[in-house]
Amino acid sequence: MVSFRTALILALITCSALVGACVSGTNPSSNSTSTNQPKGNPNPAKTNVEELGVLVNIPYEAEDIVWKGDVGNRKLVAILRFSPADSDKLIVEAEKIRPPQQINFATEAWFPAELIAQSDLSGDDTLNGKSYAANNFLLEPYVNGSITRIENTDYFVLEASK
């Protein structure tokens, strides 16, 4: 049988733990600080297709989109996923401008999970694809670029620069 003194000590410890958990979870200063402070990444990835559409032409409706511009707005990288039919049309149009070139490149943490998983399978954290001229995507001031279709997917990596 547990003594009265042991039961009292256990009850006090339990109450202290519960009060401590409640207080730390409702601290208004910690909540307001965390929402007002940037979290280590001054250049987060974006998913706003309208904002990207002001910078580059998107000739088909993208099913998935994530993109980043560098701090000086000299370059942007967008990951776009199109329907299989639109992907095929895009390739036919791009091949008219320039034949494809086989390339590979490293993934970044902000890429879609499917592409990161695919690069993990390669063993060297890279993706393979065929790169084409991005003329159908480029708008001033972005005058140079390429569009790369990632192997075995309908994902494309658009790289545009000034």
Image (tube, rainbow, N blue to C red):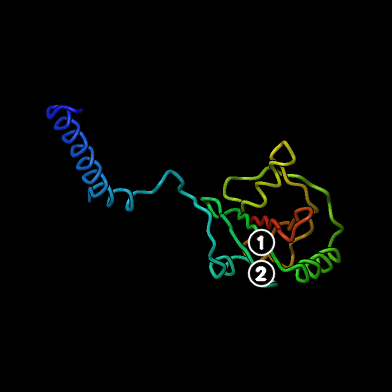
Q: Which of marks 1 and 2 is nearer the N terminus?
A: 2
User: Of helix, strand and loop, which one carries label 1?
Assistant: strand
Proximity of marks 1 and 2: CB atoms separated by less than 8 Å: yes
- In what element is the residue under mark 2? loop
Judge from the rendering whether residue 113 lies leftward or rightward of residue 100; answer left or right: left
Residue at coordinates 53% horizontally, 65% vertically from top-left?
48
User: Which amino acid is tagged 2?
Assistant: Ile
Dot 1 amino acid type: Leu
Residue in the foreground of this view, choosing between 17 and 55: 17
64 lies above or below 39: below
What residue lies at 53% left-to-right and 54% top-to-bottom? Answer: 45
The C terminus lies in quadrant: bottom right
Q: Which of 148 and 152 is in front in this view?
A: 152
**Which residue position is annotated with label 2?**
58
Q: Residue 44 carries which label?
A: none
* Residue 3, position as x, y percentages in the image: 15, 27
Residue at the limit of the structure toward the front, as seen here: 1
Q: Nearer the viewer, mark 1 or mark 2?
A: 1
Q: Quadrant of the N terminus?
A: top left
Q: In which quarter of the image is residue 125?
A: top right
Q: How crowded is mark 2: few (under 14 residues within 10 Å), some or many (20 or more)?
A: some
Q: Camera-side residue: 128 or 59?
A: 128
Q: Which residue is drawn at 25% across and 42% down?
A: 21
Cα gap from disc 1 to disc 2, whole angstroms: 9 Å
Which residue corresponds to mark 1? Answer: 80
Q: Residues within 10 Å of mark 1 (few under 14, many from 20)?
A: many
Would you say 140 lies left or right of 93 here?
left
In percent of the image, x 66 and y 61: which residue is there? Answer: 80
Where is residue 38 shown, x and y percent of the image? 38, 49
Residue 8's spot in the image, x, y percent?
A: 14, 32
Relative image position of residue 115 (x, y in whole percent)? 67, 50
